Amino acid sequence: MLKQLFAIAAVAGALVAPAHAAEKTMSANFVGDWCFGDGYDAQTKTTNYRLPSWTEDGQCTKSKILSIGSYGFYFNDTDEHCDVVSAGYSSDTAPSGTGYTAKITANCSPSGAWAPRSKTFVFERYKGNLEVKR
């Protein structure tokens, strides 16, 4: 009888544990609106973005904006929402500043449709520049 109670408690604990697991979020180093920057490199599948304060007139003049929040991000040019599933972060500091890297796995789907696909992204930030590899 005691063995059965322990077995039931173990199963119940395993079922409850994921509900209390820490949520995966975007680092504050990446949160904000990012303007389309120098372009897209098809060979590396990397897009360059800049903070609005790093643009000529201090605002996004092109329609491609990447909005990053605590729990996900949105590419307005492709109307794609992505919710963070897991995230890994690193940084590298040099005399000229600190660079931040995030490897993000996210469930992404077009706006208005809930058909998420798991995708992996690499975000690399240095000062007001952000490179996003899809």
Image: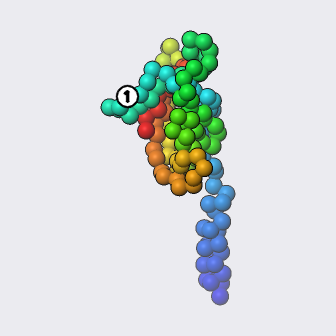
Q: Amino acid at mark 1?
A: Asp
Q: Position of residue 66 (x, y in %)?
A: 56, 32
Q: Position of residue 40 (x, y in %)?
A: 41, 28
The image's colour scheme reads rainbow
Q: Position of residue 130 (x, y in %)?
A: 50, 26
Within-10-Å neighbours for mark 1: few <14, some 14–19, many 20+ = few
- Count the marks: 1
- In the rendered image, the residue lying farthest to the left is 43
> Would you place residue 125 above or below residue 70 in this image?
above
On the question of residue 86 being in view, the answer is no
Residue at screen point 55% across, 40% down:
79
> Would you place residue 117 above or below residue 3 in this image?
above
Residue at screen point 48% across, 52% down:
117
Q: Nearer the viewer, residue 122 or 95?
A: 122
Q: Position of residue 82 (x, y in %)?
A: 56, 44
Which residue is denoted by mark 1 in the rendering?
41
Q: Nearer the viewer, residue 80 or 43?
A: 80
Residue at screen point 43% across, 35% down:
133
On the question of residue 15 being in view, the answer is yes
- In the rendered image, the residue lying farthest to the bottom is 1
Name the quadrant containing residue 39: top left
Residue at screen point 58% across, 39% down:
73
- In the rendered image, the residue lying farthest to the top is 56
Q: Nearer the viewer, residue 110 or 20?
A: 110
Figure quadrant of the N terminus = bottom right
